[in-house]
Every structure is written in C-alpha cells, then in structure tokens.
Image: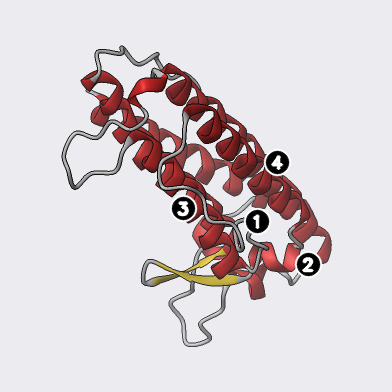
Amino acid sequence: MACGTGLRIGIINEMKRTRFVQNLLGIGLLSVVGCRMGDDKKETSSNLVHTDTNKTKEIADGLRRELIEAWHQSEKMTMINVQQMPTEYFTYKYTEEAMTFSEQWRHCVIYTCGQLAGRAGIKNPYENIKLPVQMPKEDVITELKNMYAHVRKSIKELSDEKLFSDCDFAGATIPVWRLFYAMENHIIHHRGQCVVYLRLNEVVPKGYYGW
C-alpha cells in the first residue's frame, strides 16, 4: 500500500515538474533543459539556455521558486513522520543489519549536504561536524530542520550559471537543478522506509496530501 502510493506520488510529481519547465520555456523540456543532445556538438543544457540572458533569468527564477516549494513540502511530510514516532522507538530497527529510525534520518542529513557539496560546490555545514550515530528525537528534528533550511538557502543563493551547469550523478550527467530533485527523491526513499518503521511499532501513519 505504502509503496504503491509512493510510486503514484513520484510519477505525478515528475509529470508536474516536466510540465512546469515546458510551460516556462515554451518548448520541449529535453531539447533545452535535458542532459545532453544526441548530435555531434554534444551541447549541454547550460550552453543552450545561456543563449538568451533574459530568458535564462526567467527560467532560473521559476526553477528556484518550484524547487523551494518542493523542499518546503518535503520538510512538511518528513516532520509528520518524525513527530509520529514515539521517543522510545528512535533506536528501533527491524533487523540487525538495518539502520535505526534515528539513523535513517541522520543518513538523509549527511548524504544530502555531502552530495550538494561534492557535486554542486555548495558549502557543507557538516564538513567539520560528526553527528552521533544515534540521536534522540529532539536532535533528529533539529538537524532535519537545519538541513532543509540549508537546502532552501542554497537554492536561493546559487548563481544562474551554477544552477544550469552539469554535474555527474549515478553514472549520468545532469544539470545541478535536477540534482536537488535527486536529493529529494533520496529522502522520499528513506521516508517510505520510516513509514514501515511506524507500522511495525503499531503507529498508524498520517495520510500524505499535496506534492
């Protein structure tokens, strides 16, 4: 049930994002903002978009608004999940090999900030900080709020050039703006696991609405 719902939400989100950029550009998404063209010139999204400075700013501002809204919604759904788990179950894990509920969210914080730093050149607030492997509920909430604030601040402050520049991720070349969606998808993956953690401890997850 949870997997099916998550898959449908993921498909709907991707369709919305595709339509958003298509409408903003007035032309096909892949021809302008996609990863790479199939011709001999191998033009990237950054080369193509920068042919018109005014259009570039319009596209960049629109993407920033959409990304920030997506991360606001992500934080809202994450906090619903975290707040629902009773404090005594933050060290719960369903097998010895699995991460605890607390570790799941610690991993999301470290991975998100680390990937944005390594692939987009964004300063990592955890570069010189080592979070405890197990954190109490209040600390998990604090670090998650810090991470979400950091991501939104980074989106606002990132230059247009950097937003449309290319980076390597998962064996492919993608624009940096798409990296932010990849990081959100990673959080969705772990949030889905944490929904199961709730059910295994007889906590009924609240319904998720919106995108």
Number of numbered discs on residues: 4
Q: Are marks 4 and 3 in contact (CB under 8 Å)?
A: no
User: Secondary structure beneath disc 2?
Assistant: loop
- Residue sitting at 32 percent across and 26 percent down? 195
**Residue 52: image tag:** 2
Q: Are marks 1 and 3 in contact (CB under 8 Å)?
A: no
CA gap, disc 1 and disc 2: 34 Å
- Residue sitting at 83 percent across and 60 percent down? 54
State which mark lies toward you, 1 or 3.
1
User: Secondary structure beneath disc 4?
Assistant: helix
Residue 140 lies, in percent from the top left, at: 51, 35
**Residue 65: image tag:** 4
State which mark lies toward you, 1 or 2.
1
Q: 55 or 138, which is in the foreground? A: 138
**Which badge, 1 or 2, comes first in the chain's sequence?**
2
Q: Can see residue 147?
A: yes
Residue behind mark 1: 125
